[in-house]
Amino acid sequence: MTSHIDPDGDAIGSVFAFAMALGSLGKEATVYLRDKVPYRYEFLPSPDRVIHTLPVGKYDAVFILDCGSLFRVGSGHDRIGAMGPVVNIDHHDTNDHFGMIDIVDSGASSTGEIIYRLLKPLGVKVSADMAVNLYTAVFTDTGSLRYDNASLEAFRICEEMVKAGVKPSRVATMVYESHPRERFLLLGEVLRTLTTYGDRIAVARVTSDMFERTGTNREFTDGFVEFIKEIRGIEVAVLIREIDKGNHKVSMRGKGTVDVAAVCNAFGGGGHRNAAGCRIEGTMKETEEKLLQALAPEGCMKDGENSAELSLMDGEAET
Ligand code: 5GP
Ligand code: MN
């Protein structure tokens, strides 16, 4: 069982809960995640076998959760098809149905919701540990039950998980209020790059130098793009993160009017209408220009404002 690189709460919570569920049915599930569990999700109860090196060998089934495309599993994804029949369980609008079996519902709030739905027919009783994982999956992927996907069903699942023993305040504290101090040094640097275009697009940038200066890494940027989305009037928030020279990871968030998954999909990425990502080759400046060009037809830039860069902070924005 596996999920995507840079795993989020839905990826980890869903995989952990489903591995535990299969374990309770007497199946031996091995969880493979390319990346280590980010610090904010280390509190999640883990199933027995979690590995970070792609195993070799054959399996009865390979479950891939919360991945719109097979490559999101990380390097070695091309070997996965040979390991066993692939079951693709996901809720991304842009899912490309790479499985032998595809359980894809873009109407589901989260992959956690789909896993939850599978438990009853499988005859699995939700344990307290499963409940924390499922609650965290649904709660984080709905932006703490604030986004459009915070459906009645999402609330119902959270209610049921609380009944099964989850303490919401503990999850919130662990996920949102347990950051190392260094994260805020990084946030300070990133916010100094904040630039708005036509009052509707906000862009912030993260360079490798910033990670070095602040003693942080990419997992510390989790939540930054949601933060700049909080600016009044902003329709699209963009965080551009340097992976290495000439290679950038883009995180995009929308507030409803622009389909950011479609914009990211044009660059080979994907996601959801209001939360998506992609990778773009080129310098930071080239990457930003490509993104602004792609966003222009979405009506996010008023006429003549394509080049009118308005930095929110004094001085030149760092690139
Ligand atoms: P994030 O910006 O937090 O990395 O991702 C936001 C959403 O877009 C998540 O649902 C994530 O799975 C999806 N996403 C991010 N990057 C990519 C990408 O490169 N390709 C695809 N298909 N989806 C992505
Ligand atoms: Mn998800």
Image: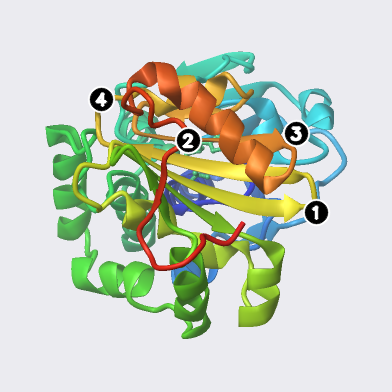
Residue identifier under label 4: 257
Residue identifier under label 2: 307
Task: Tell me the residue at 65%/71% (across/down).
Answer: 211
Residue identifier under label 3: 59
Residue identifier under label 1: 53
Which label sits in the foreground, 2 or 4? 2
Between residue 131 and residue 34, name the one nearer to us: 34
Q: Residue furthest right?
A: 56
Which quadrant of the structure image shows residue 83?
A: top right
Residue 126 x %, y %: 31, 50
Which label sits in the foreground, 3 or 1? 1
Which secondary structure lies at badge 2?
loop
Q: Residue furthest bottom?
A: 181
> Disc 2 marks which amino acid?
Ser
- Above/below status of 64 relative to 103: below
> Disc 1 marks which amino acid?
Thr
Which label sits in the foreground, 3 or 2? 2
Residue 85 x %, y %: 70, 21
